[in-house]
Amino acid sequence: MTDTWLTSLITANPQEGFELAITLSRRGVKYTQPDPEMLHKLRPDYAESADSLTAASQVIAINFQTVAAANNYWRN
């Protein structure tokens, strides 16, 4: 993947920040496993795993923490 898609971590509000955190998390998976067939093949395994879903939520939370800090927690 060579496209430049992330030009800033600055968002207008926390909702946009959370959505960016999800995008960062999903993109991380795509970079780690670039084969779409393999991603779809593995999805049923992690989709029903409480541990995998908890880990995914943790990655999103860490990314949201990063975006929130970049936005000075949306304070003026």
Image: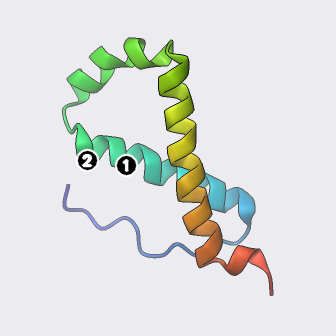
Spatial separation of the CA atoms under disc 1 and disc 2: 6 Å
**Relative side of 10 to 38, left or right:** right
Do residues under tags 1 and 2 come within 8 Å of each other at their CB atoms?
yes
Relative to 28, is 16 above or below? below
The three-letter amino acid code for the residue at tag 1 is: Arg
Q: Residue 3: x percent and y percent?
A: 25, 62
Residue at horizontal 37 percent and vertical 48 percent from the top = 27
**Relative side of 63 to 38, left or right:** right
The three-letter amino acid code for the residue at tag 2 is: Tyr
Circle 1 residues within 10 Å: few <14, some 14–19, many ≥20: some
Viewer-proximal residue, 45 or 15?
A: 45
Colour scheme of the rendered structure: rainbow
Q: Residue furthest front?
A: 51
Residue at horizontal 35 percent and vertical 48 percent from the top = 28
Q: Residue furthest bottom?
A: 76
Residue at horizontal 53 percent and vertical 27 percent from the top = 53
Q: Residue furthest right?
A: 76
**Relative side of 31 to 70, left or right:** left
Q: Identify the image quadrant of the C terminus.
A: bottom right
Q: Label 2: which residue?
A: 31
Q: Residue 8: x percent and y percent?
A: 48, 76
Q: Label 1: which residue?
A: 27
Q: Residue 41: x percent and y percent?
A: 28, 15
> Judging from the image, what secondary structure is the residue with disc 1 in?
helix
Residue at horizontal 66 percent and vertical 60 percent from the top = 16
- Answer yes or no: is residue 2 visible: yes
